[in-house]
Amino acid sequence: MTPLPESPRDLLLASFHAAVAAVGAERVLPAHLPAPPRGRTLVVGAGKAAAAMAACLEAHWPAASPLAGLVITRHGHGVPTRRIDVVEAGHPLPDAAGLAAAERVLRRVGDAGPDDRVLALISGGGSSLLTLPVAGLELADARAASQALLDSGAPIADINCVRKHLSRTLGGRLAAACRTPTRVLMISDVTGDDPSVIASGPFAPDPTTFADALSVFERWRITPPATVRRHLEDGVAGLHGETPKPGADCFRRVEHRLLANGRAALLGAAAHFRERGVTPVILGDTVTGEAREVARAFAALAREVRLHGGPWAPPVALLSGGETTVTVRGGGRGGRNAEFLLALAIALEGLDGIHALAADTDGLDGNTDCAGAVMFPDGPARAARLGVSATACLDDNDAFRYFAALDGLIRTGPTRTNANDYRAILIA
C-alpha cells in the first residue's frame, strides 16, 4: 500500500468538512446580493440553509437600507438574526409551526409593493418546511402522503411533484402571489439543479401536472389518503387550477441564481485531497439509485483500482455526490449514506487498503442524529466478533447499529447548508 499523509479516517473526515465549507452560505452568498431597491427589501425563504443564508445576508446588507422578512428552517438549524425572523419547523415531515410560518411567507410576498424587492433564500428541505396544504387537506394528510413516498424509495423529483400539487406555496405559487421583482438565491441539494425541484420550486415554473402527481402513487404502488387522491383526481378533471407553467407572466419578474451545489462540494473536497498528495477523481454529482445497488457498482470499481492500479493509480480518492434512495423494508435505523457504506463494506469482502466515507452535507442522514459514517476494510470481521452481522443489519435497514458498534458514526450536528450526499472512497 502507498503511505498516506495521515490516518485514512482523519483524511476522510477532513475532506467532508472541506466539502461542507465549500457550500456554506458565507462562502457563496455575498457575491450574489443585489443593490438595495428604492423601497423595502423583503426576505423570505425555506430550507436547512435558510437561517445561515439570512444571517449572512444581514451581515452584508447596508445598515441604512430597510430589510425585513421571514425564513423557515429545520428544528435545530436556526441561528441568531436581528432583522429577519427565523422559524424552526418540521422536516422531513411538515408540522404546525411550518404551516403557520408558510402562511406568513405567502402573505409577505403578496404585500410587496412596486418599489420593493423580494429576496428568496431557498435550499434543500424547503419542500417540507414551506408546506401549506390546499383547502380541504389537513396537515395529517400531507404528512401521511410524504411518509409513504419517503419510505417507498421514490426519487425526490417524484416526491416533490406530489407536494407541489397539494400546496398553496410550492410549484411556482409564491411567484404567482408576488407582484414585485424577485431574486431567488439557491443552494441546490438535487441532481441537475433544476429550480423547479429544489425545495419544490416555490418561485419556479412547474412542468408537472395533477396527472403526473397521481401517477407517482401508482408507479410506487402507494395508496394515498383518500382526501389526497380525491384532490388530485379533481385536479385532473379540471376542478382545481394547475400550478403555474413555463411561460406564465408571473415568472418575468423572477430571477434564479444557483449559489452552490453538489459539484461545488466535491471540488472543495478534491482540493483537500490534492493538497495532501492524493489524486481526486470526481465520478459525478448526479449519482442516483438504490443505495445498496450503487454501492455494489462502486465496490467493483474500487476493487479494480486496488488490485490492478487502474484506471487510476493509488493513492486515489473516488468522489461522488447526488442522492441515492433506500426502500425501507426493515425496522432498523440509518440513512442512505450509512446504508451505502454498509453495502460497500459487504461487497468489498474485507479487501485491504480501501476506506470510505459517506455522509449528508446537511449533517443528518436518514432517521438518525448522524451525518453518516466511515467504513474500514476490517469492519465486517470486527463487527462479527462483537456479535453484529453486517448482512443482518443491511437486511433490517439498520446501518446505524453496525457503525455504532465500530465507532464509525459521524456526528457534526446541523451544518446549516445542504448540497446532498458526499461519498469518498480512499484507495491506498
Image: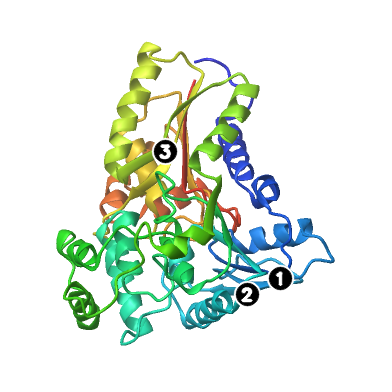
Proximity of marks 3 and 2: CB atoms separated by less than 8 Å: no
Give the quadrant of residue 396: bottom left
Q: In this view, does 271 lie above or below 333?
A: above
In this image, 348 relative to 194: left or right? left
Which element type, helix, strand or loop, lies under badge 2?
A: loop
Proximity of marks 1 and 2: CB atoms separated by less than 8 Å: yes
Give the quadrant of residue 293: top left
Q: Name the residue under label 2.
A: 113
Q: Is residue 407 visible?
A: no
The residue type indicated by label 2 comes to Gly
Query: Residue at point 31% right, 80% down?
Result: 141
Which element type, helix, strand or loop, lies under badge 3?
A: helix
Label at residue 379: 3
The residue carrying pointer 1 sits among few (fewer than 14), some (14 to 19) or many (20 or more) residues within 10 Å by Cα, namely some
Residue 377 placed where, x, y %?
42, 31
Q: Mark 1 points at which residue?
A: 40
Residue 24 placed where, x, y %?
63, 49
In this image, 61 relative to 215: left or right? right
The residue type indicated by label 3 comes to Gly
Residue 397 placed where, x, y %?
31, 55
* Number of the front mark, 1 or 2: 2
In this image, 194 relative to 111: left or right? left
Of the image marks 3 and 1, the number of the one nearer the N terminus: 1
The residue type indicated by label 1 comes to Arg
Query: Residue at point 57% right, 66% down?
Result: 45
Q: Is residue 381 above or below residue 62?
A: above
